[in-house]
Amino acid sequence: MSKKLLTYVFMRLTNRFKIGIFKRSGKNFSGKTCVFHRGGGNKKFYRSIDFFRRLDSFGFICSIIYDPNRSAYIGNVLYDNGFFSFIVLSEGTVMGQRIFSGSSFNKNPFNTKSSSFSLKSQALFSVVSNIEGCPLMGSTIARAAGTGAVIVASSLESITLKLKSGWLVNVSPHAIASVGYISNMLYNMRIIGKAGKNRW
């Protein structure tokens, strides 16, 4: 397959996961402006992210892109079974990197950044992110840039995680989590500079 054709196929696949967003800032249910001076902003597309990661398949990172709807970077993943999706990346992930997504790969975890597998197969005191609160519900804990949690205790019934805020959270050992902190760790150090940039 030629490089030009491969690029075309890749762009068509990417566009299938993009959804247009209609802005309703300052308007009520009927479209009437109720709060003034709430306009502005650049046009955005919402990219559907795979927060479940239960494919039990290997894949590789095709590209790393910026998503205006979230603070972390996201990546295009092409799996060995032909599935294609966006995922939230961990810090230190590079293009072309091989990752694993699933729960059945328990004996020898593929312990690379952005790989996801069940918490019961991850080592004690390892850093995880993109954590499921309940199995099969999709990740809900530690999804923002630079966030993560440390596994501080483990048992057959529950896994205890220590968040960056200092809170301790108990989750199921069958919940899925990614390896490493979420990417773009310097996000909170950015300088906005002017009010117009916030409005963009």
Image (cartoon, rainbow, N blue to C red):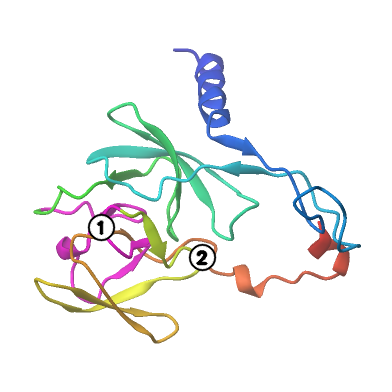
Q: Which residue is mark 2?
A: 144
Q: CA distance from mark 1 to mark 2?
A: 20 Å
Whether residue 111 appears in magenta in the rendering, the answer is yes
Which residue type carries mark 2?
Ala
Q: Which corner quadrant holds the C terminus? A: bottom right
Callout 1 crowding tier (Cα within 10 Å): few <14, some 14–19, many ≥20: some
- Whole-percent x and y of residue 79? 33, 33
What residue is drawn where x is 28% and y is 28%? 81
Quadrant containing the N terminus is top left
Q: Which residues are magenta?
A: 108-136
Residue type at mark 1 is: Pro
The residue under the point 31% across, 45% down is 99
N-term-proximal mark, 1 vs 2: 1
Residue at image coords 76%, 43%: 43
Residue 189 lies, in percent from the top left, at 65, 74
**Residue underneath mark 1:** 135
Q: Nearer the viewer, residue 121 or 28?
A: 28
Would residue 164 appear left or right of 151 to someone viewing this image? right
Number of other residues with Cα within 10 Å of mark 2, as a class: few under 14, some 14 to 19, many 20 or more: many
Task: Give the image location of residue 97, x and y in percent.
Answer: 37, 44
Indicate which disc residue 75 carries. Answer: none
